[in-house]
Amino acid sequence: MKNIPDVKQGLIAVSRDCFPIALSEKRRAAVKAAYAGELYECPVTVENELDMLKAVADVKAAECNALVVFLDNFGPETSETLIARHFDGPRMFVAAAEGDGDLINGRGDATPTAGCSTAPITSVCGTSRVISPNIPWARQGISQK
């Protein structure tokens, strides 16, 4: 008898629309490439509520039963918390903690993203949305050179 669930993880990236979406897509691909296990990369990057609905529908269609929401470029707080509300399985929010050095054209300094993205998530999910996502309390890794 097998008593361990088969987990299929999905990865959704979120980004504010004032930042280049290509940067979030590049970082999302890097997260997938660095992950050793099976990880479905959702092609929809969430910048607003309509994108959120498309992304959640996409990971559900791909039969994902666990979700990683990658907060890149100070993700839009409303859309990212609604992902947690609309996705039925376990979900974890992670944020970029290191930049790639391209501070001007790529606006790639992600250092403040970890705090600026996860702080509103904890506040909004815990108070108005009554959602309990997993948010890692410590750095889980660093970007590769």
Image (spheres, rainbow, N blue to C red):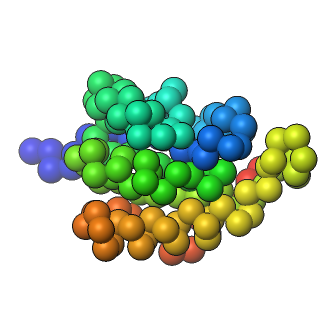
Residue nearer the viewer, 61 or 21: 21
Residue at coordinates 30% horizontally, 68% vertically from top-left?
128
Q: Is residue 66 left or right of residue 77?
A: left
**Percent position of residue 35, x then y:** 57, 44
Vertical order, 41 against 99 (above or below): above
**Percent position of residue 117, x then y:** 56, 62
Residue at coordinates 45% horizontally, 65% vertically from top-left?
121
From this viewpoint, is residue 132 visible? no
Residue nearer the viewer, 71 or 67: 71
Residue 7 placement: quadrant: top left
**Percent position of residue 10, x then y:** 41, 38
From this viewpoint, is residue 54 visible? yes
Residue 30 placement: quadrant: top right
How many dots with numbers?
Answer: 0
**Percent position of residue 82, x then y:** 35, 50
Q: Is residue 4 left or right of residue 119?
A: left
Residue at coordinates 71% horizontally, 66% vertically from top-left?
112
Vertical order, 104 against 29 (above or below): below
Residue nearer the viewer, 46 or 138: 46
Quarter of the figure with the N terminus: top left
Query: Residue at the left extreme?
Result: 1
Residue at coordinates 61% horizontally, 70% vertically from top-left?
115
